[in-house]
Amino acid sequence: MRRTAGTKTTPDAVHTDDCGTAGKNTKPLAREQALRVITEDGVTVCPYCRPDTDPGVL
């Protein structure tokens, strides 16, 4: 999950582990955490690597 720049630590987007657009402010999440932030917390997914299309997510 990548976080926005600045003093806020608001989640910006969820990426796959091999996404080239993730950037240096990305931290790994467990599968369950990633599913929760996508489905419950409303964090967007990267439009390039599309982690929400992984089998079993949606």
Image: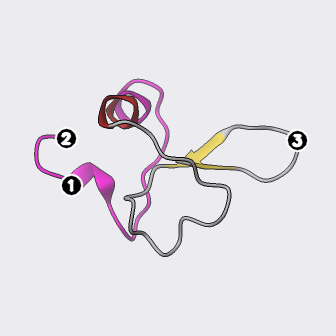
CA–CA distance between discs 1 and 2? Answer: 7 Å
Q: Residue at x 31, y 54 (%)?
A: 51
The answer to which of marks 2 and 3 sits earlier in the sequence is 3
- Quarter of the image with the C terminus in it: top left
Q: Label 1 sits on what residue type?
A: Thr
Q: Mark 1 — residue?
A: 53
Horizontal and vertical percent position of residue 44: 47, 47
| In-front residue for pair 50/23 | 23
Magenta stretch: includes residue 51:
yes
CA–CA distance between discs 2 and 3? Answer: 31 Å
Q: Label 2 sits on what residue type?
A: Val
Q: Mark 2 — residue?
A: 57
Q: Residue at x 74, y 38 (%)?
A: 9
Q: Residue at x 43, y 56 (%)?
A: 15
Q: Farthest residue to the left: give it.
A: 55
Magenta extent: 36-58
Q: Mark 3 — residue?
A: 7
